[in-house]
Amino acid sequence: GPFRRLIAAWFVNGAANALPASLFLFFVNDRLQAPDQSGLLFLLYFVSAILGIPFWNWAAGRGMKHRVWGGAMVYASAVFAIVLFLEPGNVTAFAVITVLTGLAFGADLALPPAIQADVIAADTAETGAKRAGIFFALWQVATKTALAVTSGLAYVALEVAGFQAGAGADNSETALTTLTLLYAGAPIVLKLLAVGIMWRFDLDRERLQAMGAA
């Protein structure tokens, strides 16, 4: 039960992360019209994610991991909503958003695997079976499926909207709005859905200790 809830949230949140990852260059190049800044912005995001990991590990050690992860997703969604209102040339504002959401991505890197480890420990304590390999395999399937399916659907939607990438492309406002909604709007909805899935997750520290799995 806990693993089904966790992997569902992981899949939905993975889909939310896959959209900006797949459309990042399109958004920076064609919506912000700042192709020369894409490399720096990309670097800022991942450096911020790495820097955020110690904080999220610290926070998880002082509270319920799933609630800390949920809080991180809500925070990321609130910050990312500003992207919906950016105009061409708003590179500085986007850089700030990139740093702040990158810090939140550190929670995605640190907390779900930690929760998964708790699930495996609880399963072993409850059943006596060692099924970590199965859990890890399903985890990887969910990760890759979320990326492949979400990216594929996003590209199809952009094609239907008439979006064209590349220098000199003359995109309509409809195409650029579709790009923005896919890049920022859809991930916000998906992350909030993942929060809803995990908020009542019932495998906390007290239950693990009662099972002898902590």
Image: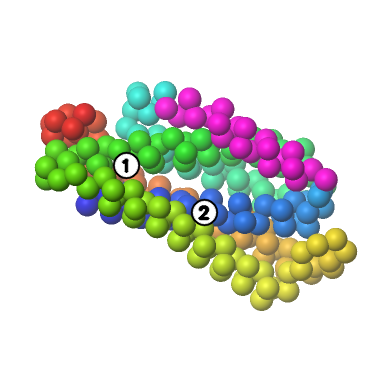
Q: Is residue 53 magenta?
A: yes
Q: Give the main secondary structure, helix, strand or loop, of the magenta stretch.
A: helix
Disc sitting over residue 116 in the figure: 1
* Residue sitting at x 42%, y 27%: 57
In the displayed structure, would residue 31 be above or below residue 72?
A: below
Foreground residue, 59 or 120?
Answer: 120
Q: Is residue 83 visible?
A: yes
Foreground residue, 78 or 9?
Answer: 9
In the displayed structure, would residue 5 be above or below residue 160?
A: above
Q: How many discs mark residues in the rendered view?
A: 2
* Residue sitting at x 18%, y 32%: 213
Q: Is residue 100 visible?
A: no
**In this rendering, position of residue 176 left or right of residue 209:** right
**In this rendering, position of residue 89 left or right of residue 7:** right
Colour theme = rainbow
Q: Is residue 192 magenta?
A: no
Amino acid of disc 1: Gln
Amino acid of disc 2: Ala
Q: At which x and y percent is residue 77?
A: 54, 45
Question: Disc 2 marks which residue?
Answer: 16
Q: Secondary structure at mark 1?
A: helix
* Residue sitting at x 74%, y 43%: 39
Foreground residue, 183 or 44?
Answer: 44
**In this rendering, position of residue 214 left or right of residue 65:** left
Looking at the rendering, the stretch of residues picked out in magenta corresponds to 36-57
Q: At which x and y percent is residue 3?
A: 27, 49
Among numbered discs 1 and 2, the one appearing first in the sequence: 2
**In this rendering, position of residue 126 left or right of residue 42:** left
